[in-house]
Amino acid sequence: MRTPKVRELGEALRSLFSKPYTVRYPYEPVIAPEAFRGKPKFIDEECIGCGACAQVCPARAIDVRDVVEGRSGVRTMTVHHDHCVFCGQCHRYCTTEEGIILTNEYETGTYDRNLAISSVDKELVVCQECGEVIATVDHLRWVARKLGAKAFGNMGLALLLSKDLGLVAPLTRDPERPLDRGDNISLLCPRCKREVILYEQWGP
Ligand code: SF4
Ligand code: SF4
Protein backbone atom coordinates (compact mmCIF):
# COMPACT_ATOMS: atom_id res chain seq x y z
CA MET A 1 0.00 0.00 0.00
CA ARG A 2 2.84 2.39 0.76
CA THR A 3 4.63 2.04 -2.59
CA PRO A 4 1.70 3.35 -4.70
CA LYS A 5 1.22 6.28 -2.31
CA VAL A 6 4.89 7.25 -2.62
CA ARG A 7 4.66 6.95 -6.41
CA GLU A 8 1.55 9.17 -6.49
CA LEU A 9 3.27 11.73 -4.29
CA GLY A 10 6.23 11.73 -6.68
CA GLU A 11 3.92 12.25 -9.64
CA ALA A 12 2.15 15.10 -7.88
CA LEU A 13 5.46 16.81 -7.14
CA ARG A 14 6.71 16.30 -10.68
CA SER A 15 3.53 17.74 -12.18
CA LEU A 16 3.83 20.79 -9.95
CA PHE A 17 7.02 21.76 -11.75
CA SER A 18 6.26 20.49 -15.27
CA LYS A 19 4.25 22.06 -18.16
CA PRO A 20 0.46 21.42 -17.98
CA TYR A 21 -1.03 18.90 -20.41
CA THR A 22 -4.12 21.04 -20.94
CA VAL A 23 -4.17 24.01 -23.32
CA ARG A 24 -4.80 27.62 -22.34
CA TYR A 25 -7.67 28.07 -24.83
CA PRO A 26 -9.20 30.65 -25.37
CA TYR A 27 -6.09 32.62 -24.29
CA GLU A 28 -3.97 30.68 -26.77
CA PRO A 29 -5.11 29.24 -30.13
CA VAL A 30 -5.49 25.50 -30.53
CA ILE A 31 -4.27 24.01 -33.81
CA ALA A 32 -6.82 21.41 -34.91
CA PRO A 33 -5.47 18.15 -36.40
CA GLU A 34 -5.33 17.81 -40.20
CA ALA A 35 -8.39 15.55 -40.45
CA PHE A 36 -10.51 17.80 -38.24
CA ARG A 37 -13.99 18.55 -39.59
CA GLY A 38 -14.55 22.25 -39.02
CA LYS A 39 -16.62 24.90 -40.75
CA PRO A 40 -17.45 23.97 -44.37
CA LYS A 41 -16.31 26.54 -46.93
CA PHE A 42 -17.01 26.90 -50.66
CA ILE A 43 -14.00 27.19 -52.96
CA ASP A 44 -15.08 29.55 -55.74
CA GLU A 45 -12.62 28.27 -58.38
CA GLU A 46 -13.62 24.62 -57.81
CA CYS A 47 -17.37 24.90 -57.20
CA ILE A 48 -19.55 24.69 -60.31
CA GLY A 49 -22.84 25.47 -58.55
CA CYS A 50 -24.45 22.12 -59.37
CA GLY A 51 -26.25 21.86 -56.01
CA ALA A 52 -25.31 18.21 -55.32
CA CYS A 53 -23.90 19.12 -51.89
CA ALA A 54 -27.25 20.63 -50.87
CA GLN A 55 -29.02 17.42 -51.87
CA VAL A 56 -26.81 15.16 -49.73
CA CYS A 57 -26.63 17.46 -46.69
CA PRO A 58 -28.54 15.63 -43.92
CA ALA A 59 -28.96 18.82 -41.86
CA ARG A 60 -30.26 20.89 -44.79
CA ALA A 61 -27.57 23.40 -43.97
CA ILE A 62 -26.94 24.36 -47.61
CA ASP A 63 -29.29 26.70 -49.51
CA VAL A 64 -29.48 27.00 -53.27
CA ARG A 65 -31.12 30.27 -54.34
CA ASP A 66 -31.69 31.26 -57.96
CA VAL A 67 -32.50 34.85 -58.87
CA VAL A 68 -33.50 35.29 -62.52
CA GLU A 69 -34.00 38.66 -64.17
CA GLY A 70 -34.97 38.63 -67.81
CA ARG A 71 -32.77 36.13 -69.60
CA SER A 72 -29.93 36.01 -67.05
CA GLY A 73 -29.57 35.12 -63.41
CA VAL A 74 -27.36 34.20 -60.49
CA ARG A 75 -27.33 31.15 -58.23
CA THR A 76 -26.16 31.71 -54.66
CA MET A 77 -25.05 28.65 -52.68
CA THR A 78 -24.87 29.24 -48.93
CA VAL A 79 -23.77 26.90 -46.17
CA HIS A 80 -25.05 27.81 -42.69
CA HIS A 81 -22.54 26.89 -40.00
CA ASP A 82 -25.18 27.12 -37.28
CA HIS A 83 -27.15 24.27 -38.91
CA CYS A 84 -24.18 22.15 -39.97
CA VAL A 85 -23.45 18.88 -38.13
CA PHE A 86 -19.92 18.64 -39.63
CA CYS A 87 -20.55 15.21 -41.13
CA GLY A 88 -18.48 15.91 -44.26
CA GLN A 89 -21.04 14.50 -46.72
CA CYS A 90 -20.97 17.70 -48.82
CA HIS A 91 -17.23 17.36 -49.39
CA ARG A 92 -17.41 13.62 -49.91
CA TYR A 93 -20.08 13.83 -52.62
CA CYS A 94 -19.03 17.13 -54.22
CA THR A 95 -19.14 16.75 -58.00
CA THR A 96 -15.71 18.32 -58.47
CA GLU A 97 -14.41 16.89 -55.14
CA GLU A 98 -13.04 20.26 -53.94
CA GLY A 99 -15.96 22.67 -54.44
CA ILE A 100 -16.63 22.64 -50.71
CA ILE A 101 -14.16 21.62 -48.03
CA LEU A 102 -14.26 21.26 -44.28
CA THR A 103 -11.73 23.66 -42.82
CA ASN A 104 -10.07 23.26 -39.42
CA GLU A 105 -11.92 26.28 -38.03
CA TYR A 106 -13.95 25.23 -35.01
CA GLU A 107 -15.14 28.50 -33.46
CA THR A 108 -18.82 28.76 -34.37
CA GLY A 109 -19.95 31.15 -31.63
CA THR A 110 -21.42 34.43 -32.91
CA TYR A 111 -23.87 37.12 -31.83
CA ASP A 112 -25.37 37.23 -35.35
CA ARG A 113 -26.42 33.94 -36.98
CA ASN A 114 -26.54 35.65 -40.38
CA LEU A 115 -22.76 35.90 -40.25
CA ALA A 116 -22.31 32.13 -39.69
CA ILE A 117 -22.19 31.37 -43.42
CA SER A 118 -19.96 30.71 -46.39
CA SER A 119 -21.41 31.40 -49.83
CA VAL A 120 -20.57 31.46 -53.50
CA ASP A 121 -22.29 33.08 -56.52
CA LYS A 122 -22.53 31.42 -59.93
CA GLU A 123 -23.84 32.84 -63.20
CA LEU A 124 -26.89 30.97 -64.50
CA VAL A 125 -27.72 29.75 -68.00
CA VAL A 126 -31.37 30.59 -68.59
CA CYS A 127 -33.68 29.38 -71.39
CA GLN A 128 -33.78 32.22 -73.92
CA GLU A 129 -37.44 31.43 -74.65
CA CYS A 130 -39.18 30.94 -71.29
CA GLY A 131 -36.59 32.00 -68.69
CA GLU A 132 -36.37 28.55 -67.06
CA VAL A 133 -33.04 27.86 -65.30
CA ILE A 134 -30.97 25.30 -67.25
CA ALA A 135 -27.74 25.12 -65.17
CA THR A 136 -24.86 27.34 -64.16
CA VAL A 137 -22.31 28.48 -66.73
CA ASP A 138 -19.51 26.81 -64.74
CA HIS A 139 -21.45 23.53 -64.58
CA LEU A 140 -21.88 23.42 -68.36
CA ARG A 141 -18.20 24.34 -68.86
CA TRP A 142 -17.24 21.49 -66.50
CA VAL A 143 -19.40 19.01 -68.47
CA ALA A 144 -17.90 20.31 -71.73
CA ARG A 145 -14.35 19.80 -70.38
CA LYS A 146 -15.23 16.22 -69.43
CA LEU A 147 -16.66 15.51 -72.87
CA GLY A 148 -13.83 17.11 -74.84
CA ALA A 149 -14.57 17.33 -78.56
CA LYS A 150 -17.83 15.40 -78.06
CA ALA A 151 -19.27 18.50 -76.34
CA PHE A 152 -19.88 19.97 -79.79
CA GLY A 153 -22.53 17.27 -80.30
CA ASN A 154 -24.78 19.12 -77.87
CA MET A 155 -26.19 22.43 -79.07
CA GLY A 156 -26.23 24.11 -75.64
CA LEU A 157 -22.61 23.15 -74.92
CA ALA A 158 -21.51 24.02 -78.46
CA LEU A 159 -23.06 27.47 -78.11
CA LEU A 160 -21.44 28.07 -74.75
CA LEU A 161 -18.01 26.96 -75.97
CA SER A 162 -18.37 29.00 -79.15
CA LYS A 163 -19.33 32.05 -77.09
CA ASP A 164 -16.28 31.50 -74.85
CA LEU A 165 -14.17 31.45 -78.03
CA GLY A 166 -15.83 34.65 -79.25
CA LEU A 167 -17.35 32.87 -82.26
CA VAL A 168 -21.07 33.57 -81.87
CA ALA A 169 -23.28 36.48 -80.93
CA PRO A 170 -26.54 35.74 -79.05
CA LEU A 171 -29.60 35.36 -81.31
CA THR A 172 -32.68 37.48 -80.71
CA ARG A 173 -36.04 36.22 -81.89
CA ASP A 174 -39.03 38.35 -82.81
CA PRO A 175 -41.52 37.39 -80.05
CA GLU A 176 -44.35 37.44 -82.62
CA ARG A 177 -42.72 34.65 -84.63
CA PRO A 178 -43.39 31.12 -83.32
CA LEU A 179 -40.46 28.83 -82.50
CA ASP A 180 -39.02 27.04 -85.47
CA ARG A 181 -36.03 24.85 -86.34
CA GLY A 182 -33.71 27.86 -86.49
CA ASP A 183 -34.34 28.37 -82.78
CA ASN A 184 -32.62 25.08 -82.07
CA ILE A 185 -29.45 27.12 -82.34
CA SER A 186 -30.11 28.99 -79.12
CA LEU A 187 -29.98 28.13 -75.43
CA LEU A 188 -33.32 26.44 -74.80
CA CYS A 189 -34.61 24.38 -71.87
CA PRO A 190 -35.81 20.80 -72.61
CA ARG A 191 -39.47 21.89 -72.70
CA CYS A 192 -38.88 24.61 -75.30
CA LYS A 193 -36.65 22.28 -77.34
CA ARG A 194 -39.51 19.79 -77.37
CA GLU A 195 -41.83 22.48 -78.68
CA VAL A 196 -39.41 23.21 -81.51
CA ILE A 197 -39.32 19.52 -82.43
CA LEU A 198 -43.10 19.10 -82.22
CA TYR A 199 -43.61 22.21 -84.32
CA GLU A 200 -41.12 20.79 -86.83
CA GLN A 201 -43.06 17.52 -87.05
CA TRP A 202 -46.63 18.74 -87.19
CA GLY A 203 -46.38 22.38 -88.18
CA PRO A 204 -48.33 25.30 -86.68
S1 SF4 B 1 -19.43 21.70 -57.16
FE1 SF4 B 1 -19.45 20.73 -55.15
S2 SF4 B 1 -19.64 22.43 -53.71
FE2 SF4 B 1 -20.18 23.25 -55.69
S3 SF4 B 1 -22.41 23.05 -55.79
FE3 SF4 B 1 -21.56 21.18 -56.75
S4 SF4 B 1 -21.47 19.68 -55.09
FE4 SF4 B 1 -21.72 21.74 -54.13
S1 SF4 C 1 -20.75 18.96 -43.20
FE1 SF4 C 1 -22.66 17.75 -43.29
S2 SF4 C 1 -24.17 19.02 -42.27
FE2 SF4 C 1 -22.44 20.35 -42.71
S3 SF4 C 1 -22.97 21.31 -44.67
FE3 SF4 C 1 -21.74 19.48 -45.13
S4 SF4 C 1 -23.24 17.84 -45.47
FE4 SF4 C 1 -24.30 19.52 -44.41
Image (cartoon, rainbow, N blue to C red):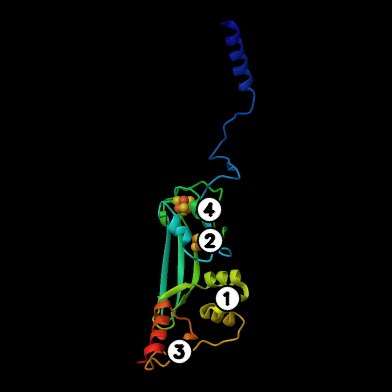
Q: Residues within 10 Å of mark 2 (few under 14, many from 20)?
A: many
* The CB of the residue at mark 3 lies under 8 Å from ligand 1: no
* The CB of the residue at mark 2 lies under 8 Å from ligand 1: yes
- For the residue labelled by badge 2, is the local secondary structure a helix, a strand or a loop? loop
**Residue underneath mark 3:** 181
Snapshot quadrant of residue 68: bottom left
**Residue underneath mark 1:** 151
Q: Residues within 10 Å of mark 4 (few under 14, many from 20)?
A: some
**Residue underneath mark 4:** 92
Q: Which-is-in-front pick, marks 2 and 3?
A: 3
| Residue under the point 57% across and 82% down | 163
Question: Whole-percent x and y of residue 146?
Answer: 59, 68
Q: Which three-letter amino acid code belongs to the residue tagged 3?
A: Arg
Question: Do tag 4 and tag 2 residues touch (Cβ < 8 Å)?
Answer: no
- Say which label, 4 or 3, has the lower sequence index: 4
Q: CA distance from mark 1 to mark 3?
A: 21 Å
Task: Using the image as rendered, state which of residue 84 and residue 144 is in the foreground.
Answer: 144
Q: Residues within 10 Å of mark 3 (few under 14, many from 20)?
A: few
**Residue underneath mark 2:** 95
Q: CA distance from mark 4 to mark 3?
A: 42 Å
